[in-house]
Image (spheres, rainbow, N blue to C red):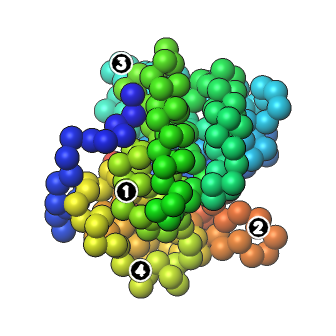
């Protein structure tokens, strides 16, 4: 079962562990085969990647997504069973998360649970990414109800080696109570111009870096190291950095690899194994 409550927060120190990669959602595997192939590349410190077919699971199983999900699931299973070399273990440990759009609290509970069941039945996902999650205090009870239901669904799943994972996609610092409603919170999603001057909310210092994730677009390669320092200082254990900025026809800057993918991975992970 996901760690919805934890065993008690501890104060974060100034230098946390190196972060890993969280992928908000690449394009369809048929259109972005290179991106999906990189998820299992030896040396890639993947924490999780989001599967989003049609703002959710779609209407029927997609054969290309089934294949991509199977490859990532098999890599994770080999890593957990010690069947991969040490330098590849972190790459194989990543989970596939199903994308659930909460529409800031406007979608009905039953509809979201139905989507979650489809993700589990068709793609045997290892958790869920709750996109456009409410961030205010008023939305917390409904989110807690949903994450409790999802935790029970994941707990019943036969494929959940190491437990499932729930990530709340706020994109900003929410009301502090959300930290106890899921395994991880996305507390920043935006451009480099805002990220470089951003600050973490005071209450986040009571939690370890594994509880937070940051997604930054429009980040020049020359500022990669600076962005990693900011992530560590603010306690982000999972990151995705890209120089894509959503312009020049890009509908989602996070849907493709950054031009400096190899350098990004090597800076935060154990290095690329060719």
Which residue is located at x 30 percent, y 56 percent? 209
Q: Which residue is mark 3?
A: 81
Q: Which residue is mark 4?
A: 198
Relative to 153, is 199 above or below? below
Of the two numbered discs 2 and 1 on the same chain, state the one appearing first in sequence: 1
Residue 73 point in image, percent of width and height: 53, 26
Residue 88 in sight from this viewpoint: no
Q: Is residue 167 left or right of residue 81?
A: right
Which residue is located at x 67 percent, y 65 percent? 253
Check disc 3 and report its element: helix, strand or loop: loop
Of the two numbered discs 1 and 4 on the same chain, state the one appearing first in sequence: 1
Of the two numbered discs 1 and 3 on the same chain, state the one appearing first in sequence: 3
Label placed on residue 19:
none
Residue 31 in sight from this viewpoint: yes
Give residue 92's quadrant in the image. Answer: top left
Q: Nearer the viewer, mark 2 or mark 1?
A: 1
In which quadrant of the rendered image does the N terminus lie? top left
The CA distance from mark 3 to mark 2 is: 39 Å
Relative to 25, is 158 above or below? above
Give residue 110's quadrant in the image. Answer: top right
Which residue is located at x 37 percent, y 56 percent? 177
Check disc 4 and report its element: helix, strand or loop: loop
Q: Which residue is mark 2?
A: 250
Q: Nearer the viewer, mark 1 or mark 4?
A: 1
Which residue is located at x 49 percent, y 18 percent? 156
Check disc 1 and report its element: helix, strand or loop: helix
Residue 75 point in image, percent of width and height: 49, 27
Q: Which residue is mark 1?
A: 177
The CA distance from mark 3 to mark 4 is: 40 Å
């Amino acid at each position: 079962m996901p760690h919805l409550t934890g065993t008690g927060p501890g104060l974060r120190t100034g230098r946390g562990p190196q972060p890993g990669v969280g992928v908000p959602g690449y394009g369809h595997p048929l259109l972005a085969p290179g991106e999906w192939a990189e998820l299992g590349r030896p040396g890639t410190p993947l924490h999780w990647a989001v599967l989003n077919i049609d703002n959710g699971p779609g209407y029927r199983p997609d054969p290309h997504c089934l294949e991509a999900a199977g490859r990532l699931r098999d890599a994770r299973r080999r890593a957990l069973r010690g069947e991969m070399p040490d330098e590849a273990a972190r790459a194989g440990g990543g989970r596939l998360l199903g994308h659930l759009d909460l529409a800031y609290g406007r979608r009905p509970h039953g509809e979201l649970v139905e989507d979650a069941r489809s993700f589990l039945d068709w793609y045997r996902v290892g958790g869920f990414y709750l996109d456009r999650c409410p961030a205010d205090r008023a939305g917390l009870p409904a989110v807690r109800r949903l994450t409790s239901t999802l935790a029970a669904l994941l707990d019943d799943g036969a494929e959940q080696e190491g437990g499932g994972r729930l990530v709340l996609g706020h994109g900003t610092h929410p009301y502090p109570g959300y930290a106890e409603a899921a395994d991880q919170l996305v507390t920043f999603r935006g451009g480099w111009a805002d990220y470089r001057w951003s600050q973490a909310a005071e209450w986040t210092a009571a939690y370890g870096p594994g509880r937070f994730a940051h997604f930054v677009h429009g980040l020049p390669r020359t500022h990669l190291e600076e962005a990693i320092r900011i992530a560590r200082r603010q306690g982000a254990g999972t990151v995705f950095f890209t120089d894509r900025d959503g312009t020049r026809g890009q509908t989602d800057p996070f849907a493709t690899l950054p031009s400096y993918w190899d350098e990004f991975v090597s800076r935060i992970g154990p290095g690329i194994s060719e």
